[in-house]
Image (cartoon, rainbow, N blue to C red):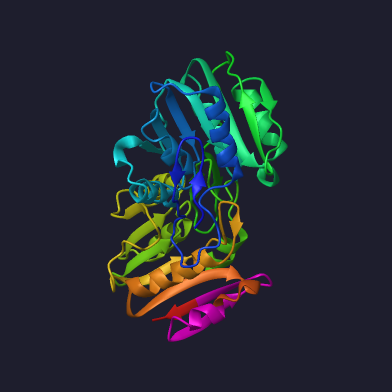
Amino acid sequence: MPIFATAFAQLDLIRQPDQPHEPLQAFDAADEYLLKQLAEQGLAANTRVLLLNDNFGALACSLAGKVQLTSSGDSHLGYLGLQVNLARNRLPADAVQFVPASATAQGPFDLVLLRVPKTLALLEEQLIRLHGQLAPGAQVLAGAMIKHLPRAAGDLLERYIGPVQAALAVKKARLLIATPEVKAVPVSPYPTRYRLDKPAIELLNHANLFCRDDLDIGTRAFLPHLPKHLSRLRVADLGCGNGVLGIAYALGSPQAELCLVDESYMAVQSAAANWRAACGERPVEIRAGDGLAEQAADSLDLVLCNPPFHQQQVVGDFLAWRMFQQARAALVTGGELWIVGNRHLGYHAKLKRLFRGVEQVAATPKFVVLKAIK
């Protein structure tokens, strides 16, 4: 892998999850541009810096030990990437304080370095939370590759922080430099809520949730075909989002023991609130994680999954394939993985490579619901 070389450090960085022959880098020209801007400005050792959405720790590892550093983001895989890359470059683990996006980083901060996220609602919520957390004379620098930088990002910076100046493009990356000004205390529009008829539940959704304002059409196709069991099965909702699959299954299977896992901290936060609202004090395990990587082998009877087809702005089925592998390892012999997916993704053929039996449970013009038996 190429070395990430800047005025601050030369680093050997990898993405998470780590893949053999990984074609993508753990950094890009927007990271380089942000650090070049800092090097030109100069940084004092007592500068209190907040990093937002530093995908795999490229910014944090570059600045570790040089400033007082806090990093915050919504990706557990990003957090794992930070830990791995600190260790890989012999940097102390405590050089960076990490705050999940489900909590608010506590300032005051002299400088905020922000990678513009894919979800503008997450950006808006993060900017709202900066109110009252910026020191006098603070600066907010936002960076992105131009192809991933919507005009609305600058509008949000101006609305919640202050006047914005766009720097010249460098290597297809751009910086937006915001100067904080006094603003009225903002009211966050998040979390949002919507109701379902079957099951009759209301779902709360924090800012970075996929399909935050309505049920996504894949899950809508899946829900009517969820299995129901009277026995005490051990069940995981893998990539749980707001928890709707696990909650709907739990309501129809009162003895089941559920585990809901997602790599998004805001998803886990949403799922926990929704479980309490729908299932009360019924025991459940809800956690942020790298899928089922930490799940004991042969410990589950059933896995439910609506797999993602992207990681940040990168589209592909590598995360889904990894989830299928994790599910197979975690299931007992005879255990089942139930998924929903777009027809064109060909999950049926992929599952046949891992499971002894694959059946189509239901289909719509766009989606298929599949059951794979270990």
Q: How many marks?
A: 0
Q: Is residue 60 magenta?
A: no
Residue 151, horizontal then vertical, whole percent = 72, 36
Residue 241 visible, this angle: yes
310 sits left or right of 304 in the view = right
150 sits left or right of 30 in the view = right
Q: Is residue 282 above or below residue 30?
A: below
98 sits left or right of 193 in the view = left
Q: Which residues are magenta?
A: 348-370
Which residue is at 69% across, 44% downward?
Answer: 172
289 sits left or right of 196 in the view = left
Residue 241, horizontal then vertical, whole percent = 48, 53
Towards the viewer: 266 or 360: 266
Q: Is residue 188 above or below residue 321?
A: above
Residue 2, horizontal then vertical, whole percent = 51, 54
Which residue is at 55% across, 62% downward?
Answer: 23
Residue at the far bottom: name it.
Answer: 356
Residue 80, horizontal then vertical, whole percent = 38, 51
